[in-house]
Image (cartoon, rainbow, N blue to C red):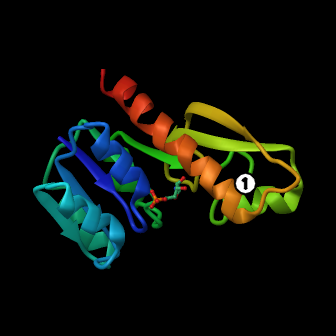
Amino acid sequence: MIAVLASGAGSNLESLLLNNIPIDLVASDKPNCNALKIASNHGVSNIIACKKLKRLEQMLSKNEYSLIILAGFMRVLSPWFVKKYKIINIHPSLLPEFKGLHAIEQALEAKVSQTGVTIHYVDEGVDTGEIIYQHSCPIEATDTVSTLKQKIQTLEHKIYPEIIYRCLK
Ligand code: GRF
C-alpha cells in the first residue's frame, strides 16, 4: 500500500497520479486543501483528513505501507511514526542548504547561482534524512520567487515520479 501526505496545492500529488504511481491513500492535516480535491478528482478511494497530527498518525498506522510519500506535507512527523515506515520527501533546495520553510526565498536571499531539488528519506529532523537524489537548477539574475518556484516545480513534477518508481522496485 502506498500513501501520500500533503497539506497544500497538491501539484506534486497530481504529477504522481498522472504518472500512474499506484496511490492507495491520500492524507492531510488540512481538510480544505487543494491536494484533497485533486485526490478526489482522480478517484483515490481512501482520503483521510485530520488537523490533529497525532490522530492522523494513529489513523494512518492501522495500515502497512511499502512507501509513504510526503508531497508538500507541512508538519513534522512523530519519531515513532518515522521509525515505523519508509517515508520520502521532496524539498525545493539542494540540501543541506536551505532547510525548512521558504527554501526558494532563502536561496534568492543568499544570492547563490544555483539551487535545486532534493528527494530524501525522512528521519526525526526537518529535511535532515539521507539524500536519495538531487537535481540542480540555475538561478538567473532576473529570477523572482515566482519564476524560480515555477522552474523548481516543473523539475519536481518530472523527477519525483521517476525516483519513486526506482524506490518501489
Ligand atoms: C513543493 O515545492 C515541495 O518541494 C515542498 O512543498 C511544495 C509542495 O507543492 N515540500 P505542491 O503542494 O505539491 O504543489
Image quarter in which the C terminus is found? top left
The extreme top residue here reads 169
Q: Find residue 30 and report its horizontal and vertical position in percent.
A: 34, 76
Up the image or down, 103 lies above or below 82; here it is: below
Identify which residue is drawn at 37% across, 46% down: 15
Q: Return the residue nearer the eye: 103 or 78.
A: 103
Q: Return the residue nearer the eye: 128 or 73.
A: 73
> Would you say residue 99 is visible in this rendering?
no
In the rendered structure, which amino acid carries the disc numbered 1? Answer: Phe
Q: Find residue 120 and report its horizontal and vertical position in percent.
A: 52, 39
Q: Find residue 126 and report its horizontal and vertical position in percent.
A: 57, 56
The residue pinned by badge 1 equals 98
Identify which residue is drawn at 42% across, 51% down: 12
Q: In the rendered view, does 147 fall on the left or right side of 9?
A: right
Up the image or down, 155 lies above or below 57; here it is: above
Q: Find residue 21 and report its horizontal and vertical position in percent.
A: 27, 37
> Would you say residue 40 is visible in this rendering?
yes
Up the image or down, 16 lies above or below 11; here it is: above
The image quadrant that residue 48 belongs to is bottom left
Disc 1 is placed on an element classified as loop
Label 1 near ligand 1 (CB < 8 Å)? no
Q: In the rendered view, does 6 fall on the left or right side of 151?
A: left
Q: Return the residue nearer the eye: 131 or 26.
A: 26
Q: Residues within 10 Å of mark 1 (few under 14, many from 20)?
A: some
Image quarter in which the N terminus is found? top left
The image quadrant that residue 37 belongs to is bottom left
Identify which residue is drawn at 28% across, 77% down: 31
How many labels were placed on the picture? 1
Q: Return the residue nearer the eye: 123 or 33.
A: 33
